[in-house]
């Protein structure tokens, strides 16, 4: 269930970001609240809170290290993903999204502002496939 809600919200955020170059933070915060509610009943509330912190912190660190401006809406989107998936997956997602964005910029030689959430979405899909595969291999 959490993958369905995550990808539904993430899809809406990505479409809005591509069209308007803006992330509506209300959608990300709604996702955080839904994820916290879900994780509370699963008994993983601490993992969700640490995931939220990791999602916000990784954007802060990336902005300091790379000098790029990753926006607050993207940070809240990563916090939402961290609330759903936990802190380790969100760290991998942020790394993969950053690499994908850099590859895209080098191939397209496009140095204007890019919507970052599509890269976050692709990275989330890749990591989620790995998580689902890991789940099926265990069971």
Image (cartoon, helix red, strand yellow):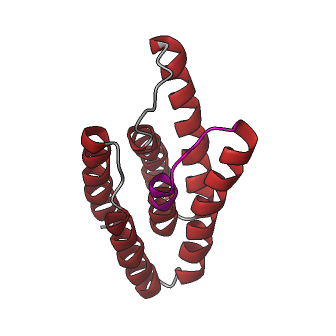
Residue 45: x and y, percent?
Answer: 53, 82
Q: Residue at x 46, y 86 (%)?
A: 40
Q: Which residues are magenta?
A: 67-76
Q: Which is more toward the observer, 31 or 26?
A: 26
Residue 119: x and y, percent?
Answer: 44, 37
Quarter of the image with the N terminus is bottom left
Is 132 in the magenta?
A: no
Which quadrant would residue 4 be assigned to in this image?
bottom left
Name the residue furthest right: 65
Does residue 120 appear left or right of residue 34 in this picture?
right
Residue 26: x and y, percent?
Answer: 33, 68
Q: Which is more toward the observer, 33 or 44?
A: 33
Q: Residue at x 44, y 79 (%)?
A: 36
How many labels were placed on the picture? 0
Q: Residue at x 58, y 67 (%)?
A: 51
Q: Which is more toward the observer, 60 or 39?
A: 60
Q: Residue at x 70, y 37 (%)?
A: 66
Q: Which is more toward the observer, 39 or 96?
A: 96
Residue 34: x and y, percent?
Answer: 35, 76
Vertical position of residue 58 compared to residue 65: above or below: below
């Amino acid at each position: 269930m959490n993958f369905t809600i995550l990808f539904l919200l993430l899809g809406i955020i990505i479409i809005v970001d591509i069209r308007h170059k803006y992330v509506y933070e209300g959608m990300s915060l709604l996702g955080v609240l839904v994820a916290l509610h879900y994780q509370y009943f699963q008994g993983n509330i601490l993992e969700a809170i640490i995931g939220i912190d990791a999602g916000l912190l990784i954007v802060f660190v990336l902005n300091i290290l790379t000098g790029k401006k990753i926006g607050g809406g993207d940070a809240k989107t990563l916090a939402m993903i961290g609330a759903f998936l936990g802190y380790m997956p969100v760290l991998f997602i942020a790394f993969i999204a950053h690499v994908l964005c850099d590859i895209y910029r080098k191939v397209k030689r496009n140095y204007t502002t890019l919507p970052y959430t599509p890269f976050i979405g692709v990275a989330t899909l890749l990591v989620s496939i790995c998580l689902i595969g890991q789940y099926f291999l265990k069971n």
